[in-house]
Every structure is written in C-alpha cells, then in structure tokens.
Image (spheres, grey):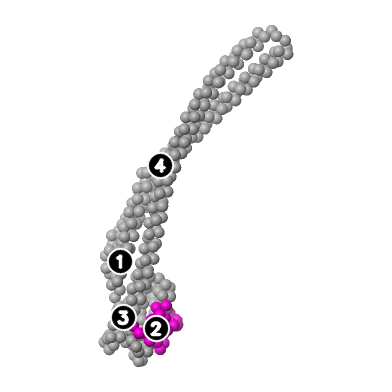
C-alpha cells in the first residue's frame, strides 16, 4: 500500500472512530437565548445551530415551514426574513411578528429567530410559556433539517461505498478476464507450436526434394523442352519452401507476441491481487464503518 493510500485510510478510520463522540454533542440541538442585532436594533432572540445543513436548503425549507405553520409568507430584506401580523398556533394564539436570520459557520447553519408579541420581543424571563413553545417550535424545524442533512450525507456515503465495491468487482473481473486471456493465449501457442512442427517436417521433405531435383538437373539428358519443365518444377519447390519458412517465422513472431502479452497480464494480475484489491478492501472496510457511524448518527437524532 503506497503512502498516499495509507494516509487516506488512516484519515477515514480516524474520522470513523471519532464520529460517535461527535454524535452526542451534535444530537442535542440546544436552543440558546441572547440579545442579538437585527432590523429592529438589539433584541432578545433564540439561536440554534443545524449541523451539516446547507443555508440555501434551510432558507427554502423555513419558508415552507412558516407557511404551513402560520399561513404567512416570509419576506426577505438584507438577509433577514420576516412575517408580520401572523399567528403561529403552536406558539401562541396572539398575533405576532416573526424575524429570522441565517448564516453559515463550522459546517453548520446558524439560525436566529425573534418573536415580537404585543410590541415586545419575548424572553424566558417575562414570557415563559411563549418562550418554551417558540423554542420547541424552532427546534422541531432545526431537527428536521438536521435529519435531512444527515440523510443526504448517508446517501452520499452509501454511493461512495457502492462505487468502491464496484471498483473492487472491476479489479476481480480484470483478473478473471486476464486469466481467461492467458489460457486462450496458451492454447494458441500450443496450436502454433504444433503448426511449426508440421511446417518443419514439410520443409525437411521439400528441401530434400529440392536437392534431388537439383542433382537430377545436373545430369539431365532430356530435351530442352523437358528441361524447362523440370526447372519450373524446381522453382515451384523452392517457392513452396520459402512460403513454409515465412509461415514458420510468422508463427514464431505470433508466439513471441502472445508470450509478451501473457507476461504483461501476469504483472497486472499480480498487481491487482497484491495491491489494488487489498487496498480497495481496506478502503471499503473504512467506508462501511463510516456509513455505520452516519446511520448511528441518524438514529440518534431526536
């Protein structure tokens, strides 16, 4: 395993081992209360962080959530969303003004909401029931967004795992294909060697016939016409011999090419068996652990 893959595997395993400890901290989704600057100056509000979420997704979902819960439409002005003169039954039967701001920080979306009732921004010290209801209401929203973000993360990690397992199957398939190719090449080499053996026998026979024909022509006493016939016969024998030699040489070249391919395939098989497949299995095991941790994280969101 090369240095880069060792480092990658170490980081994956480290991340997976640390994950369970992060779950406990992130799962709580506490709503904090503090004075914050907003469009109506410094006012009391309630903040919550939504881990792993994307701000555009959260803002879009918040509009739908408020519409569903209060039938009010949010208006945006300089990054602040507001719904005026609305009623949120889950919080209070009183008419209220809702203000919300979002920003991204540390792999999370920070949400801060303000609720104005009877010209006064609610606080736990003066509006205990409304505050409890409001905190519960915005936490429910944050919880759902957190859950959706983790579900998206789980889908991504599972896709990554599927790809890794697909890569592993590809390596295994490459080995199988290479082994099939090697067997096919070996069969072809055997056939070519058998062909060469036959050609060598034919060459020996033809060469012997050529020698006999040449010897016969040195003592030939026939007519000039008959001599031409015998000389043509000799040339045909020599052509046949050359054709056989060329076939012999071609067969040897094919064998060399097939043997070179076998050596190359053997190296690829060896690389896949000793490096690529073990490395990929380690990567898959680390990814499975990562998927398991995200699944655990998802099941702990409440």
Residue at which label 2 appears: 70
| Mark 1 or mark 4, whichever is nearer to me | 1
How far apart, in angstroms, are the residues tagged by discs 2 and 1?
30 Å
The crowd level at tag 2 (other Cα within 10 Å; few <14, some 14-19, many 20+) is some
Residue 11 visible: no
* Residues at circles 1 and 3 in contact by the CB criterion of under 8 Å: no
Q: Give coordinates of residue 31: x percent, y percent.
A: 30, 78
| Mark 4 or mark 2, whichever is nearer to me | 2
Residue at which label 3 appears: 135
Residue at which label 1 appears: 299
Residue at which label 4 appears: 269
Report how many numbered discs are placed on residues in the image: 4
Tell me which residue sits at (39%, 45%) in the image: 272
Tell me which residue sits at (28%, 88%) in the image: 127
Q: Give coordinates of residue 263: x percent, y percent.
A: 44, 37
How far apart, in angstroms, are the residues tagged by discs 1 and 4?
42 Å
Q: Tell me where the magenta segment starts and ends, as one range.
A: 64-90
How far apart, in angstroms, are the residues tagged by discs 4 and 2?
65 Å
Q: Give coordinates of residue 291: x percent, y percent.
A: 34, 60
Tell me which residue sits at (44%, 42%) in the image: 177
């Amino acid at each position: 395993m090369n240095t880069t893959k060792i480092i990658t595997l170490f980081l994956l395993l480290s991340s997976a081992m640390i994950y369970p400890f992060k779950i406990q901290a992130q799962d709580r989704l506490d709503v904090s209360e503090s004075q914050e600057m907003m469009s109506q100056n410094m006012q009391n509000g309630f903040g919550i962080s939504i881990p792993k979420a994307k701000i555009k997704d959260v803002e879009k979902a918040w509009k739908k959530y408020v519409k569903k819960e209060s039938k009010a439409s949010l208006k945006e002005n300089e990054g602040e969303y507001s719904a005026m003169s609305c009623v949120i039954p889950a919080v209070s039967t009183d008419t209220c003004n809702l203000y919300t701001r979002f920003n991204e920080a540390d792999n999370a979306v920070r949400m801060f909401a303000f609720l104005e009732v009877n010209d006064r921004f609610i606080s736990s010290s003066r509006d205990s029931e409304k505050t409890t209801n409001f905190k519960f209401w915005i936490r429910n929203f944050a919880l759902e967004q957190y859950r959706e973000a983790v579900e998206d993360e789980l889908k991504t990690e599972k896709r990554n795992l599927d790809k890794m397992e697909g890569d592993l199957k590809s390596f295994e398939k490459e080995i199988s294909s290479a082994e099939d190719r090697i067997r096919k090449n070996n069969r072809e080499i055997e056939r070519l060697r058998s062909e060469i053996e036959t050609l060598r026998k034919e060459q020996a026979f033809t060469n012997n016939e050529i020698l006999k024909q040449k010897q016969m022509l040195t003592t030939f006493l026939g007519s000039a016409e008959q001599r031409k016939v015998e000389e043509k016969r000799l040339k045909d024998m020599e052509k046949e011999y050359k054709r056989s030699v060329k076939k012999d040489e071609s067969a040897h070249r094919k064998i060399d090419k097939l043997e070179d391919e076998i050596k190359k395939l053997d190296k690829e098989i060896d690389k896949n068996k000793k490096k690529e497949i073990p490395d990929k299995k380690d990567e898959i095991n680390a990814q499975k652990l990562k998927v398991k941790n995200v699944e655990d994280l998802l099941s702990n969101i409440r």
